Amino acid sequence: MPPKRRTPSEGISDLTIARLSIYLRYLQVLEAEEVQTVSSQDLADRFHLNSAQIRKDLACFGEFGIRGVGYNVRELKDHLIEILALDHERRVVVVGAGNLGTALSHFSGFNTGGFRIVAVLDSDPQKIGRRTPGGLTIEPAVKLGEIVRQRKVHIGVITVPSTAAQEVFDEMVSAGVQAVLNFAPTQLKEYPNVKVRNVDLKVNLEFLSFFLRHPH
Amino acid sequence: MPPKRRTPSEGISDLTIARLSIYLRYLQVLEAEEVQTVSSQDLADRFHLNSAQIRKDLACFGEFGIRGVGYNVRELKDHLIEILALDHERRVVVVGAGNLGTALSHFSGFNTGGFRIVAVLDSDPQKIGRRTPGGLTIEPAVKLGEIVRQRKVHIGVITVPSTAAQEVFDEMVSAGVQAVLNFAPTQLKEYPNVKVRNVDLKVNLEFLSFFLRHPH
C-alpha cells in the first residue's frame, strides 16, 4: 500500500483501476460459462462485489450497460481489456532471484494474459547461470540495462533486499522502464512518468495485526 | 487491492493503517541511528513520504508531535507499535505449499517483529512431510482446524489456487481465525468480524499495464 496518494491518470483513481482488473477476471469466468448479459447486481452477488461501486467505476470510462438489462459480457470484457491495455504483450524482468523472485518468475499469473517474464537477474555469482523452475537462466544483474533495451522490457519487478532496491530502480528507470512492481520493503524515490506499485508483505501483516486488536 | 471499501475501524481508513506500518519502519531506522527527534518534513524528505499526510494520519490517534520541534522518535515508535498491536506474538499459518507459499514461509518479514509462521499446510500427498527451506515440515491441509486451535493461530495466509481458496477460508474462519492474507486471485465471501487483506499479484500487473497506456 503506497504511503502517498498517486496522481490519478485522467481523474481515475488507482483503486478504480485495480477494481477493473477484478471485474475483468469475473467477466472472463462468465464468458467461459457462455453467459451473454449480466447486471451489476448479479455480478456483485455472485462474486462478492459492490454493485453501486461497479456502476460508478465503469461510468468513469463511458456508457456500458443498458438500464434494466445489464452489460453485454463479451463487449464489456473487450472494453476492459482495451482500457487496461492487455491487448499488448508486456515483457517483464525480475531482479532478485531469492525465494520470492524465483517463486514469482514461474507464477502462472505473471506469464498469462499478455504478461511474459523475459529475464530473471541476480548479483550473486552462486545464483547466476542456474535455471529457475520456470525455465529461465538467472542472468547477472549488471546486464539489467542491456536486457531492458534489447528485450524491450515494459515492467520491472524488484525482489532484492531493501538496501539494494533504490539502485536497481534507478537502473531500471535509466534504461527506460516506466512501470515497476516493488516488493522491497522501502519507499522508492519517485521519477516523473514512472509508475511504481508497492507490494509490501510486512505492511499487510501489520495491517491485520491492527484489526486483531481493534475488531470492527 | 480489495474491490470493496471496508468499514473503517473507529473511523480510521485502511490506507491510514497501512501507512502507520511504513512510518514505523522508518522510525526504527532513525532509532537505530540514534536520532532523537524528527519533524514530519524531515521524515517526508528522507523517506519519500508526504509530510501533510503524516501529520493527518498521526492526528487520528491523538497528539504526538510538538509544533516546531517534531516527534520524539522513540515515543512515536512505541505508540505505533501499540496501535498496530505489534507488542504481541502473532502466530501465522500458511495454507498452500506451492512456490509462493513456500517462499513466504521463510520470508524474513513473516518471521520477525512479532510474527511467527507456525505451520505450512498442503493437500498434496507428494508435498506432505517435506521440509520447507524455513525448517517446517509440510502438514496435511485436513489438519487446519486442529492446528489453528492447538497452536492458537491468529493469522491465516492463503496461497492455494483460487478454486480452493473459499473452502480454505471457510475452514480458517470456523476454526476461529479472524485475520486472513489472501493471495488467491479470487474475492472471498465476507464474514462479520473477520478481516481479509487481498494481495493480488495479477491485479498489480494489470494496474501497471493501464499506466503504460495512459501515462500521467
Image: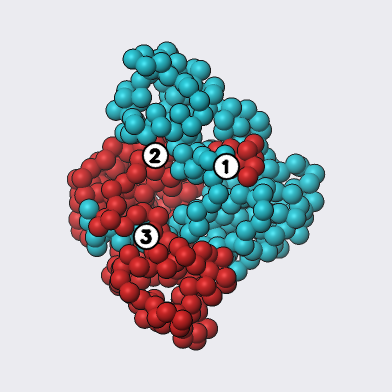
Chain colours: A red, B cyan
> Where, by quadrant of the figure, is residue A83 drawn?
bottom left
Q: CA distance from mark 1 to mark 3?
A: 25 Å
C-alpha gap between disc 2 and disc 1: 19 Å
Badge 2 is on which residue?
A3
Disc nearest the viewer among 2 and 1: 1
The quarter of the rendered structure image containing the N terminus of chain A is: top left
Can residue A174 be seen from the camera position used here? Answer: yes
Q: Name the kind of residue labelled 3 in the image.
A: Ile
Q: Vertically, is B60 above or below B147?
A: above
Q: Position of residue A203 (x, y in %)?
A: 50, 40
The chain holding disc 3 is A
Label placed on residue A17 = 3
In this figure, what is the number of numbered marks?
3
> Would you name the residue on which mark 1 appears?
B9
Do tag 1 and tag 3 residues touch (Cβ < 8 Å)?
Answer: no
In the rendering, at what x and y percent does residue B196 appear?
Answer: 59, 52
The vertical placement of A116 against A102, above or below, is below
Residue A113's quadrant in the figure?
bottom left
Mark 1 neighbour class, 10 Å CA radius: few under 14, some 14 to 19, many 20 or more: some
Q: Mark 3: few, some, or many residues within 10 Å (few <14, many ≥20)?
A: many
Give the CA distance from mark 2 to mark 3: 18 Å
Q: What residue type is disc 1 on? A: Ser
